[in-house]
């Protein structure tokens, strides 16, 4: 006791030095060590890799931080003694770029603390290829690390596990690029997903799996089939060793459903499917995964006038159809829905024979004619040239309007083209076949002016026939403008001076209404001369011009 009080034995106990101590007791969470001082020191059991390997009475080296704490007990550390001893050893044996083994001790801000004999810092960005979200999973795990930085002044070391992984991946990448062949199958992990595809990690080499090579069927986004971290089998489609790129295929690992399409779905067979897309010209029906057929809008109904498929179909709807045609090379199947029902046009020739008189409602007007609904879905068309024997109709709206009930004669039936030609003028006899019964040369006629042109005026006569009064036949005096003398709706008396069967044209003269036959003959001669010299247009052309004025 006198020796201790004199401090003789404490001369060997210097703070900041490594000393020897004897294990006197091993508890659940701590180890008691006698260092030969006034009291024993306590070391946390976590500082030992395997506290169970310690024995009571065993001599160990420890680091003396302080001789006494507030309670008079020495502050000692086994771990710091190991680090102090190992620091010099690390500096002697290791340098930046060296590979060392270490155990992850704890988590700190920005990364992990790794014991490699001394504490080293492992930044979170250097733990793995992708920075992990959960660092706790690495604690107490042992890995190889690469020393990336040694700071002797601050006595700290920075290590990286990621660089080792990347180097290993690079070696694997080179080996894979060297040995991989198109057509072979590999297992990989989905690393990243984009709008156009997914990148697959082939254990060191990333390959692109394009969205078009994921499925034989229709998908709008790769996430419909894959998720990050998923393991899949893929086929090597193309290898570009110069650019170190690999193209992959997923659908190629299964049989192409189009290989035996004609045997599975022969023309004329009935199929069931689901509407997967609607476009202005039709609907795409998925018959099986990777096989879609198109129902054109014209194949939806025999009689309904469907302008777009959305009027009768919706995406996701189940329906049946008939196979109309297959183009295997283009991977196209034509389908029809209306073929499931009887075609009403098959009975059209029976129901509407040529020459039959029919009645219907004007449904639509076009530039070339009027469509008349004979029954639901069955239209006949009256061409503008078949509306009137005597009038030149430029547009059907001149004689008809939508909703009019009209009678007509069936002129022709083409069931294959779903066309029925109708005629309205055929309801009566062509007055030009017997024009002499109504008009003769020299007759005095009365009518109303219905059109005025720069050439003359048209007079509506009986039987609906128009006669033309040329500008030269209006008055004895020269006339500059017809409208200065005549007006639409005005009633006039005129004389027939020309009947032209070929051109279906009647020439009239107002000024010759009171001529005798000698004067009339002279006037006709003058009229014929004018006609030959001025190249008068036909009655139809003049009617066209009158319509534009």
Image: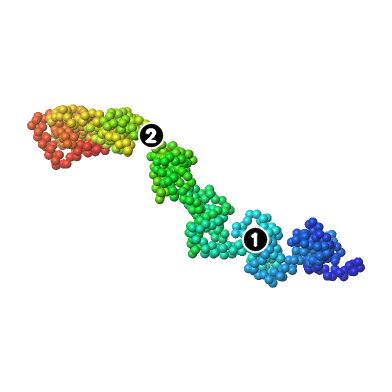
Q: Quadrant of residue 293?
A: top left
| Nearer to me, 286 or 474 | 286
Residue hosting label 2: 342
Label 2 and label 1: CA atoms lie apart by 76 Å
Number of the front mark, 2 or 1: 2
Residue at point 56%, 57% (across, down):
201
Whether residue 204 sits left or right of residue 50 in the image: it is left
- Residue 445 image point, x, y percent: 17, 28
> Which x, y percent locates residue 242?
49, 64
Look at mark 1 in the image and give the residue it sits on.
Answer: 123
User: Can you see residue 226?
Assistant: yes
- Which of pointers 2 and 1 lies earlier in the amino acid sequence? 1
Q: Residue at x 53, y 48 (%)?
A: 224
Q: Position of residue 199 (x, y in %)?
A: 53, 56
Residue 167 locus on image (x, y percent): 59, 64
Specify the farthest residue to the bottom: 92
- Of the pair 258 and 21, the residue shown nearer to us: 258
């Amino acid at each position: 006791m006198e020796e201790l009080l004199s401090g003789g034995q404490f001369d060997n106990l210097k703070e900041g030095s490594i000393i020897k101590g004897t294990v006197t007791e091993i508890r659940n969470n701590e180890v008691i060590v006698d260092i030969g001082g006034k009291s024993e020191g306590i070391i946390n059991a976590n500082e030992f890799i395997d506290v169970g390997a310690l024995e009571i009475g065993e001599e160990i080296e420890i680091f003396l931080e302080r001789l006494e704490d507030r309670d008079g007990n020495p502050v000692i550390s086994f771990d710091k003694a190991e680090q102090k001893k190992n620091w010099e050893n690390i500096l002697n044996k290791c340098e930046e770029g060296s590979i060392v083994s270490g155990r992850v001790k704890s988590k700190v801000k920005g990364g992990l603390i790794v014991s490699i004999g001394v504490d080293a810092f492992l930044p979170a960005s250097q733990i793995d290829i992708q920075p992990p979200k959960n660092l706790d999973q690495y604690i107490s795990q042992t890995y190889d690390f690469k020393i990336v930085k040694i700071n002797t002044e601050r006595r700290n070391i920075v290590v990286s596990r990621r660089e080792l992984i990347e180097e290993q991946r690079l070696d694997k990448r080179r080996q894979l690029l060297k040995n991989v062949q198109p057509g072979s199958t590999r297992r990989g992990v989905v690393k990243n997903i984009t709008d156009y595809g997914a990148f697959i990690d082939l254990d060191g080499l990333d390959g692109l799996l394009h969205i078009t090579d994921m499925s034989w069927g229709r998908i709008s986004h790769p996430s419909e089939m894959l998720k990050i971290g998923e393991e899949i089998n893929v086929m090597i489609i193309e290898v570009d060793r110069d650019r170190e790129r690999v193209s992959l295929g997923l659908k190629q690992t299964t049989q192409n459903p189009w290989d035996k399409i004609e045997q599975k779905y022969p023309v004329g067979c009935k199929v069931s499917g689901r509407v997967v897309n609607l476009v202005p010209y039709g609907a795409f029906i998925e018959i099986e995964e990777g096989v879609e057929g198109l129902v054109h809008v014209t194949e939806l109904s025999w009689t309904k006038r469907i302008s777009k498929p959305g009027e009768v179909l919706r995406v996701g709807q189940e329906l049946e159809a008939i196979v109309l045609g297959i183009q295997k090379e283009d991977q196209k199947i034509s389908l029809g829905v209306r073929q499931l029902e009887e075609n009403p046009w098959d009975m059209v020739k029976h129901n509407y024979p040529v020459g039959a008189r029919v009645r219907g409602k004007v449904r639509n007007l076009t530039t070339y004619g009027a469509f008349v609904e004979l029954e639901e879905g069955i239209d006949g068309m009256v061409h503008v040239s078949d509306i009137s024997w005597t009038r030149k109709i430029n547009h059907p709206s001149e004689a008809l309007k939508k909703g009019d009930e009209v009678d007509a004669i069936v002129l022709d039936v083409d069931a294959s083209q779903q066309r029925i030609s109708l005629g309205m003028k055929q309801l009566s006899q062509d007055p030009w076949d017997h024009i002499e019964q109504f008009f003769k040369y020299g007759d005095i006629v009365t009518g109303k002016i219905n059109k005025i042109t720069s050439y003359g005026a048209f007079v509506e006569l009986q039987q609906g026939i128009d006669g033309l009064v040329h500008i030269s036949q209006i008055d004895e005096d020269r006339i500059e403008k017809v409208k200065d003398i005549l007006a639409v709706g005005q009633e006039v008396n005129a004389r027939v001076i020309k009947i032209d069967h070929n051109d279906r044209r009647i020439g009239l003269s107002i000024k010759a209404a009171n001529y005798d036959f000698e004067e009339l003959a002279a006037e006709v001669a003058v009229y014929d001369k004018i006609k030959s010299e001025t190249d008068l247009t036909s009655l139809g052309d003049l009617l066209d011009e009158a319509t534009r004025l």
